[in-house]
Image (cartoon, rainbow, N blue to C red):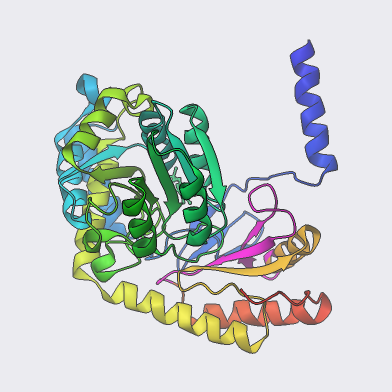
Amino acid sequence: MMWRQQIERRLRQQRERRLWRQRLPLSLLPDQRVSDGRQTLCDFAGNDYLGLARDPRLAEAQAEGARRYGAGSGASHLVSGHLEAHHILEERLAALTGRPRALLFSTGYMANLGTLQMLCTDGMQVYHDRLNHASLLDGTHVGEARSRRFHHRDYDDLERLLARSRSDVPRLVVSDGVFSMDGDIADIASLATTCTRFDACLMIDDAHGIGVIGENGSGCVGPRFGPDQVPVLVGTLGKALGSAGAFVAGEGDLIEALIQFARPYIYTTAQPPGVACATLRALDILDQEPERRHRLYENIRYWRSGADQLGLPLISSLSPIQPVLLRDSQRVMHWGRSLRESGFLVGAIREPTVPKGQARLRVTLSAAHTQAQIDALLDALARLAVTAPFEEAPAT
Ligand code: PMP
């Protein structure tokens, strides 16, 4: 029974280190609120930046898709699971991002895993921004590539690493577009210039940028940077687009190589076709209702100005991800619990998701929040700042 003891030991350590993670079964209420069965909470923790996840038009498109194509796809894409709805969605995603082709994956985690596993051959040397998402780091491990990390958004540091590296092996630079825990945005132009100079491939994971950043919500990369500058573009569909899944967009050979070699693409059931239909509806709404993005940006401005007045330690983020950098894990847990008691759901993020000493409340804003809800959250934070003050955060 050694394996049981091994599990017990790891669970004990997790508790002792106070790193225990918990899930909450929630039910949905109107107006960005949820219930945990005991109380009603206003949701400032999710990634539904445009309020589309709860839009009845997406639910209707999903139901109609299930009636038309079946509740499940029934097989992997390469067997018989690649349905018309998936194909049309791939064409729409290619058009949104200004690329010749796009390939649908069931989740963003799998898109990153599959893409890196496919790319990391022939001695590939990979360079990661230090704050890249876990799925990007995991993909490099699956691909068994050698990898180095450069300081967060420090492209001089990246250049130093590239200049010192061997030029006779293929090189790949990987960065989040919008960083998932800090909310700041990669400088795509600088990354593209550096990669061109060193003949390195550039991969951007724009999970949090798609639907939110750029003209028409085409993301941090979008058609502004072509496949010659950003050859590998990943986007997810479960955040601003309110459904689920992900895609990789690029030139024909990249997409064909993924179809031929990316194991997380080949050996898994294609996403339910209704989900693809819901995403197609979300893309229509993205086109037809730019006011959602405007409302989101108005909410971001409103929050930042209120939080600044309270002196909350913010990170300079222009995206819907607005961390309050309390730094200390115990303080973050205490503030998270207190906010919950006051009726707010906010992510309390600690190591290992962020580095030690960088614990934060991850406040996320949506177009669906009202200014009254943001005011109420700010009031609750103001009360906490008086009873459990935070340390002064260094300027970022
Ligand atoms: N990339 C980034 C930057 C993310 O934040 C996430 C999700 N948190 C993913 C990829 C994974 O996407 P998905 O949830 O669709 O698996």
* Point 85% across, 41% down: residue: 16
Q: Which quarter of the figure has residue 181?
A: bottom right
Q: Position of residue 7 (x, y in %)?
A: 75, 24
Quadrant of the rendering where the N terminus is positioned? top right
Residue 46 visible in this rendered orientation of the protein? yes
Quadrant location of the C terminus in the rendered image: bottom right
Residue at the far top in the pictured view: 1
The reply to whether residue 372 is in sight is no
Residue pictured at 44% horizontal, 39% vertical: 109
Q: Is residue 356 magenta?
A: yes
- Residue closer to the observer: 232 or 76: 232
Camera-nearest residue between 140 and 236: 140
Q: How many marks?
A: 0
User: Which residues are drawn in magenta?
Assistant: 340-368
Decide: is 289 above or below 85: below
Residue 76 magenta: no
Question: Where does residue 277 sit, x and y in percent of width and height?
Answer: 22, 46
